[in-house]
Amino acid sequence: MRYLAILISFIILISAPFFGQVDMQLTNIFDFSSSDAIVFWDIRFPRVVLAFFVGGILALGGLVFQTIFRNPMSTPFTLGVASGATLFTAIAIVLGLMQFISIFAFIGAIVTVATLFVIASRLKGTSTASLLLVGIALSFFYSACLMVMFFISDLHDSYEIVRFTMGSLDVVGFDSVAIITVVAIGLLVLILSYKYELKLLLTSHEFAILKGLDLKKTNYILLLSVSIAVGVAVSITGPIGFIGLIVPHILKLIYKKSAEKLIVPIFFYGGVFLVFCDLIARNLGTVSDIPIGVVTSFLGAPFFIYLIMRQKRGI
């Protein structure tokens, strides 16, 4: 089954740039003066690469969050990073600064990360519990602020805000793709370097402390790294849900291995999953592409319900 999954994954990755609403002549994709080459190299190929690395970031982030918080329902958006990015994007839209949306979104994500870590560091109790509570509080606060933005915005601005919250992989050229690629590879290398620490955390926090692990420092480094990487991804694509939730669980079911041994597979299949979702979004025959967040939610929501039922039964 694993080899079949790998084969199907490579078929999806290789074939994805060739499918879309505009038909292409394959013989023209290396004729760089043709429109087919422009569509392939400037739009479709960068989009597939972007989808792969964003999916990898979100899936790997889900693994880290579920390990640290010891909660199978945790996702890379648990700490309110996506909410912060969305609010600052809404501010940019309302102010008429559409060309700076990505910058505002990234600032929102970084402000959220900085805020929750500063507040959590001043609270008593376990660091993970404090971070989780602060993240939930920030998410509610950002949601209230976002409602204010909707109230004071006009119809067009409200539409742009909603579009951002649905997620989008629309990209032209490789500028944004290069940023995401560097961030994704950097996050993967960092998580691999903390493989032993993740193994200890999977056992228990008490056992990790007995083994000499600086629990607070390790948690902060991992959560801060994932949050920044997710913030960069959200600033470019908008929030894309459920990937960090379902991919780690599916891989654990398929491979039957401990999570620290699945870092690379989870990163890889997270990327493949988002490429597959984008392939669906681009080929439904609609006037425009279906927002990628809608597709991932359609696939992720039923699995989320399954996880809840599975946990309730104690399976």
Image (cartoon, rainbow, N blue to C red):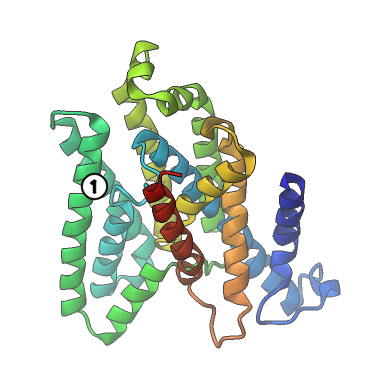
Q: Nearer the viewer, residue 252 or 310?
A: 310
Examine the image and state in which quarter residue 306 appears. bottom left
Examine the image and state in which quarter residue 26 appears. bottom right
Examine the image and state in which quarter residue 31 appears. bottom right
Amino acid on which disc 1 is placed: Gly
| Residue 97 can be seen, yes or no | yes
Identify the residue at the far right of this view. 27
* Position in image of residue 225 (x %, y %): 40, 37
Q: Residue at x 46, y 41 (%)?
A: 63
- Tell whether 230 sits left or right of 131: right
* Position in image of residue 187 (x %, y %): 49, 38
Indicate whether 230 appears above or below 149: above
Indicate whether 146 appears above or below 200: below
Q: Residue at x 61, y 72 (%)?
A: 280
Q: Nearer the viewer, residue 300 or 61?
A: 300
Q: Residue at x 36, y 41 (%)?
A: 71
Task: Kindly state the secondary structure of the residue where label 1 is placed.
Answer: helix
Identify the residue at the far front of this view. 313
Q: Nearer the viewer, residue 82 or 40?
A: 82
| Count of numbered badges drawn on the protein | 1
* Location of mark 1 (residue): 135
Indicate whether 226 appears above or below 105: above
Q: Residue at x 20, y 59 (%)?
A: 142
- Tell whether 228 sits left or right of 183: left
* Position in image of residue 160 (x %, y %): 35, 77
Other-residue count near label 1 (Cα within 10 Å), few / some / many at <14 / 14–19 / ≥20: many
